[in-house]
Amino acid sequence: MKYLYRCLLGLVVTLLAFSSCQKGSDAEETTLEVSTQTLVFAREASEQTLTVTTNKDSWSALSPQEATWLSLSQEGTTLRVRAKLNELGQERTGSIMIHAGDQQKRITVRQTAADIVLDTKAKVFFPSEGGEREVAFQSNAESVKIELEQAVDWLKVEKLTKSSFTLVAQPNTDKAARSLKVILSSGTVIREVEVMQDGQSPYIFPVMDFPMGLYDLIGYEQGRGHVLLYAKEETKTEYPHYRFLTKSKVVPFIQYQYNSPTSPGFSIATLVYTDQSLVKGNKDFDEAVAAYGFEKQTTSPDQVYTLYGNKKMPLQLLVTLFSDGAKVEFAYNPTQKKSYPTFSDLPLLRQLDFLGSRELDIMGKKVEDVRKFEQELGSTRDEHTPELYDLFTPKTSFQGEVIRGYFYIVTPTQLDDPYINVVNSVLGYFSQIDLGLWYDEIDGRYHLTDEILNLFASKGYEYMGQTANASHAFASRAKNMAYTLRLFFYKEKPVLDIQAYYTEIDDGGGSVAEILNYSASQRKRTAFLRKLDALTRTFVSQRR
């Protein structure tokens, strides 16, 4: 009986074992494949996809960076991975874990670093007494290195944080001012901060780091212990100006005039010295200004005025003596910094053939000749012009002009006056203003380009000065011809307005005797400019 029982028990165990093995062989192993093991993103926000292949009904994807710069989206067998813009100055890395059943795959994600940004103020100023200045900076880099240009005993860097550092300057006991650069660097990006400290010199000058905008100027003056007394806004009669109280007993204030609050530099800086001996024939004063490039040019016979020029900066210095002191004035001297295009020959050349002059007995072409000429060229005449002149929009431009004009003699001086309707002035409007004028952001004015000055000089035309309506005048005695150039607004758009006339040139420069008689020469030149001004005013009043 026991034997039978043991046999039955063995059979049951065998059957159970066989059944278990059969089920194990029927179970399928989990498979999981991904189309890539690495995703590399550029610094810009972008999206990439990868394909997930598995024999399981579902799979999942997770990333520790989902809370910061990665986002994941599953669509069937596709995983969409989106990276946000990387604003940091270093590469960032992350990972994605994909799970299916008991299998998992790791995807490495990298994103390119952004360009390193490193911004800070360009200048720091200390008074002669020294002191501390906190300098803030902004950077997307992990670390910024800050060091002095060279080791000195008067300046130290302290209290370095991720966004600022402190400069500590010792008192300057020397007469001369001193300066040093602080170097900020991260990777290949380098920024410089110039540190300047006043000396013990009795002389006070305006900021010599020219040009400097108003915001930085205020920081500069406050940095050397000066207090902004008042700021005057621009009016119809005055430019904006700013007066600072100094710590000096002999130079009580310094005043800056700007063309506008947004001008890149001052146009005039004025100081008053209450001790005249500091500047009058003083070698120390000459040496002090020479350190900034100023050299004495001329002194008036009565020693009241002394003018200094500067080859390093576009500034002039005028010292004016008065009974109990001196005015020291630094004035901006506009200097053209780049070349400009100009005409290959004198402007209006084709139109000069029509010019006449009753004054010089030159019979020019008449209105009917002009209109026929322009009609044959396909020009469009402005029908709203008065009899005094014609304006044409050319189909064919000779030298880039957008308008051609002709002015006529309309007032008779006798019966059957042969000069009635004769052309006595021609003009051209040019939309490219820098063919003759360049704009200066510091003084807010247009100036003749060196190129247009050289062109007229090469053709025998002398620059005569400006008329009352701001036209620049050139004249040729050999040709008895004058040109005027200026900025003009035609139909509310700025254009270069150029006009040409026949006129007798009597400006006091026709002989050595006249040139030597300065007063008479200046009177004649002024009269000549007034004559041109009268002509241009007549034409302008009709064109507005």
Image: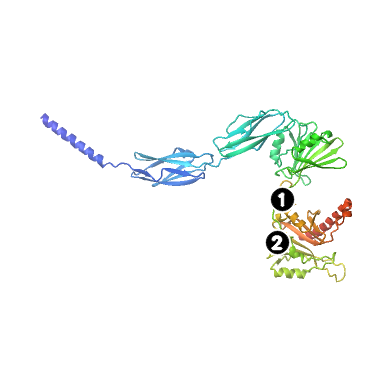
Between the C-alphas of marks 1 and 2, the distance is: 22 Å
Colouring scheme, one of rainbow, by chain, secondary structure, one colour? rainbow
Packing grade of label 1 (10 A; few <14, some 14-19, many >=20) is: some
Residue at the far front in the pictured view: 512
Residue that numbered label 2 is attached to: 399
> Is disc 2 surrounded by few (<14), some (14 to 19) or many (20+) residues within 10 Å?
some
Which quadrant of the view contains residue 318? Answer: top right
Task: Specify the label residue 439 is tagged with.
Answer: 1
Amino acid at circle 2:
Gln
Which element carries disc 2, helix, strand or loop?
loop
Residue 458, image quadrant: bottom right
Residue 504, given in percent of the width and then of the height, sits at 84, 61
Residue reaching furthest bottom? 416
Specify the quadrant of the image occupied by residue 495: bottom right
Q: Is residue 9 above or below residue 522?
A: above
- The one of 279 and 523 positioned closer to us in this rendering: 279
Q: Is 41 positioned to the left or the right of 200 in the image?
A: left
Image label count: 2
Question: Which of 167 and 449 lies nearest the eye of the viewer?
Answer: 449
Indicate the quadrant containing the C terminus: top left, top right, bottom left or bottom right: bottom right
Residue nearest the observer in this picture, 154 or 320: 154
